[in-house]
Amino acid sequence: MAEDDGARRETLGFIGLGRMGSPMSGRLVAAGHRVVGFDAAGLEGRLPESALPAASVEGVAGRAGTVFLSLPHGEVSRAVCAEIAAAAGRRAHTVVELSTIGMAAARTCAELLAAEGLVYVDAPVSGGVAGARAGTLAMMVGAEAARFVALHPVLRVLANNCFRVGDRPGHGQAMKLLNNFISAAALASTSEAVVFGQRIGLDPALMIDVINVSSGRTTASTDKFPRSVIPRTYDFGFAGALMAKDATLYAQEAAQADVPHELGTLVARIWQEFDADCPGADFTYLHKYLEGRAGGLGA
Ligand code: NAD
């Protein structure tokens, strides 16, 4: 209980109030935390009700002890960490990285913060916008045990599946990237397979029903296809650009680790080409993109 009370007293910062950051920061507010938030694209429609607005990264770092980041990629996280470290009148002592940025960027962020006496906790998440709203995310933390225990009361508000997967910054990112590689491969393979079935004359909805009681079942067939592909809304809430980023980071890290990564390289290339041809599209739109490449099979 003492840890809970301590965590509640401290003002929390939240930088990056996008699709994930807005609902996650909203959960912290709803759990009784005082939250100060900032987003470079503005706060209107992003900052949760009752959260305190900040006009800059420095404004957050001057008021909050622990600062959460939910940012698009490693370059942005690096720049924001540098701003936090250099902030005048800084109160921030800990930065919790919720973004997917890869192992190398996480280590760089940790080093540049450590040089100024701040702690960096690598804690990427999985489970999408729905999980962010409901607090059912999986969180993969790379941190020392004592640090994890101290932060756990706050982390579990965001993620009821909160794992410490390793000791160091980068361990959480490695876990997240290998998970997202599996997810990226599943959505790509299911999309290709369904387009093949369509060409042969099979019905997409019926194919998914069959797959979901057969050995090809994955989160692509149980979740992404029923929600966003079969209704042809292609609006699951995860950008193709993010999937390309994650698959590319995975292929790079696997190459760096000197393990077999032929499939990783191929999956990364599929998502890179999709992102280049369909900038801004949701990742489920890959199915429609492949229909187009098959000569326009869609409705
Ligand atoms: P998003 O683009 O919706 O949100 C990112 C936010 O960061 C935007 O609102 C943007 O304005 C803000 N931002 C960019 N640069 C900034 C800066 N310098 N200072 C302050 N704010 C800045 O992206 P998202 O979908 O919320 O994803 C955020 C992170 O979470 C990514 O790393 C992503 O890979 C990861 N993630 C996303 C999902 C998902 O389902 N969307 C799931 C798991 C993990």
Image: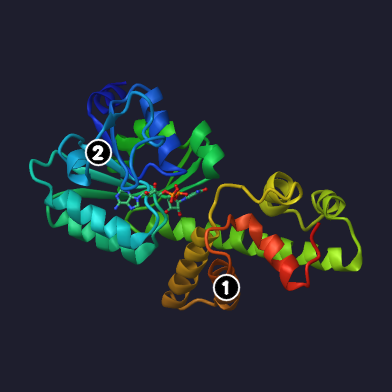
Dot 1 corresponds to which residue?
273
Horizontal side of residue 274 vs 214, given as left or right: left
Query: Residue at image x 79%, y 60%?
Result: 298
- The mark closer to the camera, 2 or 1, is 1
Label 2 crowd (10 A; few <14 / some 14-19 / many >=20): many
- Indicate the quadrant containing the N terminus: top left, top right, bottom left or bottom right: top left
Dot 2 corresponds to which residue?
66
Query: Residue at image x 36%, y 34%?
Result: 47
Q: Say which amino acid is labelled 2.
A: Thr
Q: Describe the element under mark 2 as helix, strand or loop.
A: strand
Horizontal side of residue 121 vs 199, given as left or right: left
Q: Position of residue 174 (x, y in %)?
A: 44, 60
Viewer-side residue, 222 vs 234 = 234
Lower sequence index among marks 2 and 1: 2
Horizontal side of residue 99 vs 10, given as left or right: right
Q: Position of residue 41 (x, y in %)?
A: 35, 47
Q: Position of residue 273 (x, y in %)?
A: 57, 73
